[in-house]
Amino acid sequence: MASKFERFAALHVPGDPVVLYNIWDVGSALAVEKAGAKALATGSHPVADAQGWADGQQVPFDFALANAKRIVDSTDLPLTVDFEGAYSDDPAQGGANVVRLAATGAVGCNFEDQVIGGEGLHPLKLQVERIAAIRSAVGDAFFINARTDLFLKTQTYDDALIDQVIERGKAFADAGASGFFVPRLADARQIERVVREVPLPLNVIAFPGAPPKAEWAAAGVARISHGPFPHRALMAKLEEMAREAIS
Amino acid sequence: MSQTDKAKAFAALHVPGDPLILFNVWDAGSAQAVARAGAKAIASGSASVAGAHGVEDGEDVPMEVALANAARIVASVDLPVTIDFEGGYAVDPDETARNVARLAATGAIGCNFEDQVVGGAGMHDIDLQSRRIAAIRAAVGPDFFINARTDFFLQAKPDAHDGALTDAAIERVKAYADAGASGYFIPGLTDLTLVERITGASSLPVNAMTWTGAPSNREWAGTGIARISYGPGPFRQMQKWLEEAARAELA
């Protein structure tokens, strides 16, 4: 029987993307599992929001691990954890931290290139070292979903930006990443370019007002996640119900 | 506002006939959503907290986890927060009181405290339960809102909610009030005539639990209820809503 990691990796099919409806705790994991999900993915922002913390590694490291462990123990589905910047800029320390995450039973993580608590992105050279260190520490059977925040950090989604995205994607692939995540990449033509030139399954994020999933699938997307939006929508619904009850 | 001021403000919201409405939460995020809705106070529900952690109700959420969750909820809102603390994670009065004192140290201004035997059958006898409440009161000071819950109407099916059971519940509220309770919680009872008998006999503000299909808030208010809570309903509805939203996206 295929391992959980193998099952998860095999779900990344360009043109037939795995859909991840992001969760934040065990309760949300169980609800999304009941809905028929093939895999589970936390979002760091909703994990933070659910506990009253800010995003950007304000979730204490030990809580993030304990939360991941509780989710893994509650379901047979593969779990990938949004691990932000692995709680360290240092490549070796980041690798050690991801090993601790893998020990919870999670089969993968998101790993981002923005400077958490600072400005801009890590230089490509450092980010490549960080990814290589994680791969070397965690072994082959772990899905490193390497994320670039180029799109999140700019308002100009032009072809020059896509050139930079592609440069990062190729370098991340060489460093041992398993997937490439470009939040806010949405244009089908730009997606096609990235898919053609970066040899990794591409993950984009569905946001309110995003193009239909079929359009992204046709462009070659292999994974669609939902980031903070499921939790936000749920909390808006809760607020509405509470207002009705209270009035 | 200090914790004492919050506790006093919270107590003052219990007005028979004009009840405080508590739409129960389970984490800091849900507390903030309910606060945005205009709530005057925040109350957790233990079944909801358990559900969010994937365990059963009945103190299966470890006490340290429950306390940390309570502290995060308190820190996330400016409103008074009361925590559903089940049976205080102990039977012995002194140990129970120490645990509730730790809860109070999170900044929570009150708790629910139930008389069923958690993890066992039936209910604690009235003398032991009164001693437990008295020990809590001695440990937490005069302002902490001890919402003493009786489980008579959860343990007996609705068709067994009769005058004799109501008399027993009235006997308990008198004993709990003497022991230092601040409020009386009667989840499961929906017979409004019996509710009115209890509110009429109780020196404490009475809390009803409501859900879809239970009496309306106006009807509860008409019986002299001072507090209405929603128990596990909000969490369960959110779980269902999340499942449907996820199904729509996964299809």
Image (cartoon, coloured by chain):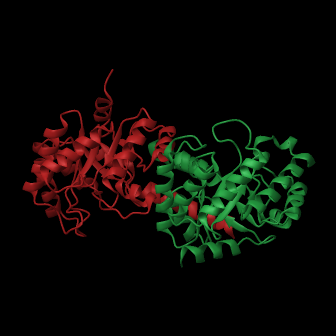
Chain colours: A red, B green
Q: Residue at x 65, y 52 (%)?
A: B233
Instruction: Decide: is A233 above or below A199.
Output: below
Total numbered badges shown on the rendered structure: 0
Is B153 in front, or is A50? B153
Q: Is residue B74 left or right of residue A47?
A: right
Quadrant in which the C terminus of chain A appears? bottom right
Instruction: Decide: is B234 above or below B221.
Output: above
Residue reaching furthest to the left: A125
Q: Is residue A138 left or right of residue A63?
A: left
Q: Position of residue B145 (x, y in %)?
A: 66, 65
Q: Residue at x 73, y 70 (%)?
A: B14
Residue reaching furthest to the top: A1
Q: Position of residue B135 (x, y in %)?
A: 65, 57
Q: Residue at x 75, y 51 (%)?
A: B150
Q: Position of residue B215 (x, y in %)?
A: 80, 57
The answer to whether residue B164 is visible is: yes
Quadrant in the picture for residue B197 = bottom right
Quadrant in which the N terminus of chain A appears? top left
Q: Position of residue B110 (x, y in %)?
A: 62, 64
Q: Is residue B60 left or right of residue A56?
A: right
Q: Residue at x 69, y 66 (%)?
A: B21
The answer to whether residue A217 is visible is: no
Is A62 in front, or is B135? B135
Is A66 in front, or is A244? A66
